[in-house]
Amino acid sequence: MQLTKLTIDAARSAVQQRKTTALALTEASYARIQKEDEQIGAFLTLCKERAMEQADRIDRMAAEGKPLPPLAGVPVAIKDVMSTRGVRTTAGSKILGNYIPPYDCTAVARMQAAGAVVLGKTNCDEFAMGSSNENSAFRPVHNPRDLSRVPGGSSGGSAAAVAADMAVVALGSDTGGSIRQPASFCGVVGLMPTYGRVSRYGLIAFASSLDHIGPLARTVKDAAIVLRTIAGRDPMDSTSADLPVPDYVAGLERPVRGLKLGVAKEYFGEGLDDEVRHAVESAIDKLKGLGCEIVPVSLPHTPYAIPTYYLIATAEASSNLARYDGVRYSYRAPGVKSLSEMYRRSRDEGFGAEAKRRIMLGTYALSAGYYDAYYLKAQKVRTLLTRDFEEAFRKVDAIVTPTSPTAAFRLGEKSNDPLAMYLADIYTVTADLAGIPGISIPCGETRQGLPIGLQILGKHFDEATVLRLAHAYEQAA
Ligand code: GLN
């Protein structure tokens, strides 16, 4: 048994049947991290002592013959934008470089209650702002499939940890694509649930109306198990939906025959790499072969999605990041002489270039005289983008697209050109703006062996259909 390659169910039942122990699984993950992570850089903080305690608790339950919870003994990694009690949580920023939260994020707490063993916190772009992980204040992450390339972002550490078998699954966050795009670059599964499906309590806010927590995994079933674990109403987050959580795992095997799949021409236009296009088109053919009906749909406002996203996201970010003032949990510049100098220098020294760029863009878009022209206008276009999806979903059960216009690019390739970096988010930001769920699953490789991702988007709160289609494709492929 290769301990670092197990699925959730295989790991849990091996522990339950005493074929291995949670401690052995945890040790195997740390050994893998020890061996691989100097090159890859997926983790910012490890919490081995705490992990060993969690594993030991599971092993004692198993020894007593008690039935184990669904994630018992499963080593998991948590993106460093989720608060973990007593474990440093940086959001990839120097300004939170020494922040130790006094409480757990709800999604993390639910993972642990289900028996998961938290290995540590994964690297990410500062405050989840980025698509390449190069905006981390600590170090970039390297793509495990090709170390000269980015893993995607902003959940690049989480995607790399899963792709390199350092963790079985990981939690990430998606505001404009940050779960799905790194999943596609690293060749793993990444699921963004519907807005409101998973509590955001304890998630360090980037853009509150767009932020989602979701799983990165090696199989669709593992992603479904994690979603089932973390989903559902949380009294600590008023935007979490009070809706029943279906058994996503039980629904996976239902046939996909007869499901209608929308294909929008706006997602196959200029800028889409040929190899990605071919891989996605053959994935669509495969789904057709499984009995799905392919239906052309139109999402006409797609060309406005990038400006809309980068106005709303920066506006919300400028407001959310105002709390890092050097007074409370954040970095404080030494040797200051006045309060205003303390604010100014703490923020100047604590934030990196991309966070500053976004604070300035967002503050500008919200300022008197520009608010109507930029922020309000963007909100109106957001409604139009949402209506595009509502219209399309009257005709189809899901929509299939590429996750990203290209496979993983090289480190440094786009880091001096923020606009080029923003434009590459074209296929992912629309789902965040509309609040609908989406998954990225591997659908082949480029000639150079780089993974390509297929994106499946679904109706509000219909993760079940998204997962079912993804599972059917995965099994067939
Ligand atoms: N790449 C996008 C951005 O830079 C999305 C980030 C995210 O989803 N957190 O804003």
Image (cartoon, helix red, strand yellow):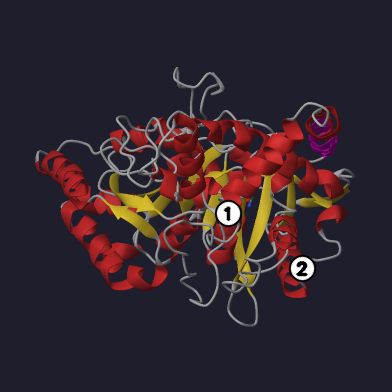
Query: Quarter-wise, where is residue 377 in the image?
Result: top right
- Residue nearest the observer in this picture, 134 or 274: 134
Give the magenta part as a residue range. 382-395
- Label 1: few (<14), some (14–19) or many (≥20) C-alpha neighbours in 10 Å: few
Cα–Cα gap, marks 2 and 1: 34 Å
Could you tell which of marks 2 and 1 lies nearer the N-terminus?
A: 2
- Label 2: few (<14), some (14–19) or many (≥20) C-alpha neighbours in 10 Å: many
Q: Main secondary structure of the magenta part?
A: helix
Rendered residue at 72%/44% (across/down): 310
Rendered residue at 49%/69% (across/down): 143
Q: Nearer the viewer, mark 2 or mark 1?
A: 1
Image quarter where the N terminus lies is bottom left
Q: Is residue 302 visible?
A: yes
The residue that mark 1 highlights is 353
State whether label 1 is within 8 Å of ligand 1. Answer: no
Rendered residue at 83%/32% (across/down): 387
Marker disc for residue 277: 2
State whether residue 151 is above or below residue 192. Answer: below
Q: Secondary structure at mark 2?
A: helix
Residue 20 among magenta residues: no
Amino acid residing under circle 1? Ala
In the image, residue 92 lies at what x, y percent?
45, 51
Q: Is residue 255 visible?
A: no
In the image, residue 69 lies at what x, y percent?
28, 37
In the image, residue 80 lies at what x, y percent?
41, 47
